[in-house]
């Protein structure tokens, strides 16, 4: 795996330079012309993270450790792996910008030197963990376009009991956790292959393990970003390892089948910011800033009214007619190409900072707007920005939850239909009656009437050749409806008699 990483480090920047030259030429309207200088090398920006997964514990291989354990291994701070507001899995890792092949190779060498390895019966230096090298590619000509990602995953090898039974307890626990994660990965791959072969909903359990959560871009069926997956399976030519090699090939074979991914932008949903384009995002921001500004203005007026004398309250002018001045310049806050998805990936204080930078220049009052009170102060801008971004986060979370619930409901319906079949037409579903209700109804109606009604329905079913079970249920429903009608009449008569007594 190290050879592949170093080869990518060597070829990545040369390829980026060629592509950058073509993009710059197309922007300038020039075809097949060499552009002078190194400006084409700045078209793409590369940021690298390197993560190591030890069982359920994720650590950053780039971050410099400060302490070591009893065995001399560096102690690294655990990195939480969670899903964010927009559905991305982005652990808080040290992201390093690299500008040349030498920088990338040096970073890979330093990170791999910190990776956990141990000798085993079959390997002198066996990796005891999974490693994920992620290279994020940003096109500076399109700063708000979706980032490209190149994810290189070096999986820890699965070990059978015969190969690990002489290991220490720590090595046994590591092998067990590695095997668990590989089994979950196998289940996800099989489920994804099943989606390509069958219609309907298929559940992909990528949330069941930290490894598959980190590989969510591979298994996310809602993702519309074009992607490809390649797997390299290591096998041994020795006849002694034929069983291991066969297991490895069978593990990798489901990767060959992949369902078609949806293409193009997602259909517009007003309640789902993930589907908004630039114009729709700009429209929502304007409406939300005006709404929050009006609410704050009304609140401030109410506070002023509370603090004034009764004779002076009528002198405070209403705020409804005042001109609403937006706290920020929306064209500067949301430039062309930016959508709600980019705002959703920001932290709250990052959005607040962008709003502060987008405050327009101060303008004095004019004759057309005599009630203007100047620009909002910085504290007011912060308040407004936090309210707006909080509302956006809420819409994203509720939209994601709603989509997930709809998927789960469709999944449950499919499971029920596959197990029990569809409900036959013309056969109503029956209410559930408990034992006490059935006994009360039988006593009130009378045992003879109950039995005769049942016999009548069953006899008709035998003559017509229909289901006896269905006839029994129909008779029960008829008797219970009659009993409930009697109970309702009794209750109505009791109420009527009470009214008559009161009137007299």
Image (tube, rainbow, N blue to C red):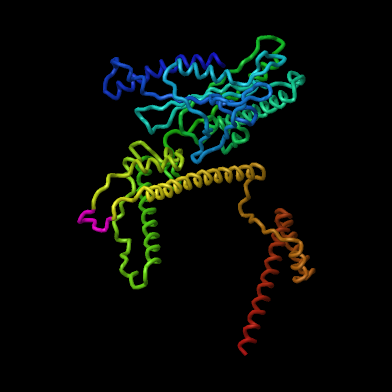
**Residue 408: quarter of image:** top right
- For the residue pair 355 and 158, the one nearer the viewer reads as 355
**Is residue 371 located in the magenta-colored stretch of the structure?**
yes
- Quadrant of image for the N terminus: top right
First to last magenta residue range: 365-372
Work out whether residue 399 or residue 464 is closer to the camera in this orientation and state it. 399
From what the image shows, is residue 163 above or below residue 296? above
User: Quadrant of residue 322 in the image?
Assistant: bottom left
Q: Relative to 52, is 395 on the left or the right?
A: left
**How many badges with numbers are in the image?**
0
Question: Is 489 on the left-hand or right-hand side of 348?
Answer: right
Residue at image x 70%, y 21%?
159
Q: Is residue 354 above or below residue 141?
A: below
User: Looking at the image, is 65 positioned above or below residue 497?
Assistant: above
Q: Residue 92: horizontal and vertical position, in percent?
A: 52, 33
Q: Is residue 490 above or below residue 432?
A: below
Give coordinates of residue 308: x percent, y percent: 37, 68
Residue placed most toward the observer, 439 or 333: 333
From the viewer's perspective, tell me whether residue 351 is left or right of residue 478.
Answer: left
Q: In this view, does 319 lie to the left or right of 117?
A: left
Residue toward you, 383 or 480: 383
**Residue plotted at (67% across, 59% down):** 431
User: Does residue 194 appear in this view?
Assistant: no
Q: Is residue 221 magenta?
A: no
Q: Magenta: predominant secondary structure element?
A: loop
Residue 180 screen position, x and y as percent? 67, 29
Outermost residue toward the bottom in this view: 504
Instruction: Name the residue at the front extreme.
Output: 67
Q: Is any atom of residue 376 visible in this view?
A: yes
């Amino acid at each position: 795996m190290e050879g592949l990483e170093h080869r990518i480090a060597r070829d990545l920047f040369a390829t980026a330079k060629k592509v950058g030259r073509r993009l710059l030429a197309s922007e300038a309207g020039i075809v097949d012309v060499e552009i002078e200088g190194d400006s084409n090398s700045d078209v793409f920006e590369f940021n690298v993270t390197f993560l190591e997964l030890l069982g359920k514990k994720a650590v950053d291989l780039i971050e410099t450790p400060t302490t070591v354990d009893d065995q001399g291994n560096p102690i690294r701070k655990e990195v939480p792996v969670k899903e964010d507001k927009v559905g991305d899995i982005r652990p808080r890792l040290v992201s390093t910008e690299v500008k040349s092949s030498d920088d990338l190779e040096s970073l890979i060498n330093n990170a791999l030197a910190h990776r956990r390895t141990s000798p085993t019966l079959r390997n002198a230096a066996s990796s005891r963990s999974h490693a994920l090298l992620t290279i994020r590619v940003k096109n500076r000509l399109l700063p708000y376009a979706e980032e490209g990602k190149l994810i290189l995953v070096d999986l820890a090898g699965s070990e059978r009991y015969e190969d690990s039974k002489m290991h220490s307890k720590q090595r046994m626990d590591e092998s067990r956790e590695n095997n668990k994660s590989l089994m979950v990965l196998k289940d996800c791959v099989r489920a994804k292959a099943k989606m390509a072969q069958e219609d309907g909903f298929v559940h992909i359990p990528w949330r069941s393990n930290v490894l598959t959560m980190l590989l969510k871009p591979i298994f996310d069926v809602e993702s519309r970003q074009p992607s490809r997956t390649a797997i390299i399976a290591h096998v041994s030519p020795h006849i002694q390892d034929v069983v291991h090699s066969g297991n490895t090939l069978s593990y990798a074979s489901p990767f060959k089948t992949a369902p078609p991914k949806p293409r193009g932008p997602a259909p517009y949903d007003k309640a789902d910011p993930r589907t908004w384009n630039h114009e729709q995002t700009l429209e929502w921001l304007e409406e939300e800033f005006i709404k929050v500004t009006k609410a704050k203005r009304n609140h401030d007026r109410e506070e002023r009214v509370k603090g004034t004398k009764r004779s002076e309250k009528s002198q405070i002018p209403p705020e409804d007619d005042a001109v609403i001045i937006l706290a920020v310049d929306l064209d500067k806050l949301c430039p062309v190409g930016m959508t709600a998805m980019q705002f959703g990936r920001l932290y709250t204080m990052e959005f607040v900072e962008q709003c502060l930078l987008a405050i327009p220049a101060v303008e004095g009052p004019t004759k057309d707007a005599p009630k203007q009170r100047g620009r909002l102060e910085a504290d007011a801008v912060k308040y407004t920005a936090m309210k707006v971004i909080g509302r956006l986060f809420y819409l994203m979370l509720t939209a994601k939850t709603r989509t997930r619930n709809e998927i789960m409901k469709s999944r449950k319906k499919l499971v029920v239909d596959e197990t029990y079949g569809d409900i036959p037409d013309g056969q109503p579903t029956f209410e559930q009656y408990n034992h006490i209700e059935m006994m009360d109804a039988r006593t009130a109606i009378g045992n003879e009437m109950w039995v005769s009604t049942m016999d009548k329905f069953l006899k008709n079913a035998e003559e017509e050749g229909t289901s006896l079970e269905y006839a029994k249920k129909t008779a029960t429903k008829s008797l219970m409806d009659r009993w409930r009608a009697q109970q309702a009449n009794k209750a109505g008569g009791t109420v009527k008699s009470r009214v008559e007594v009161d009137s007299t």
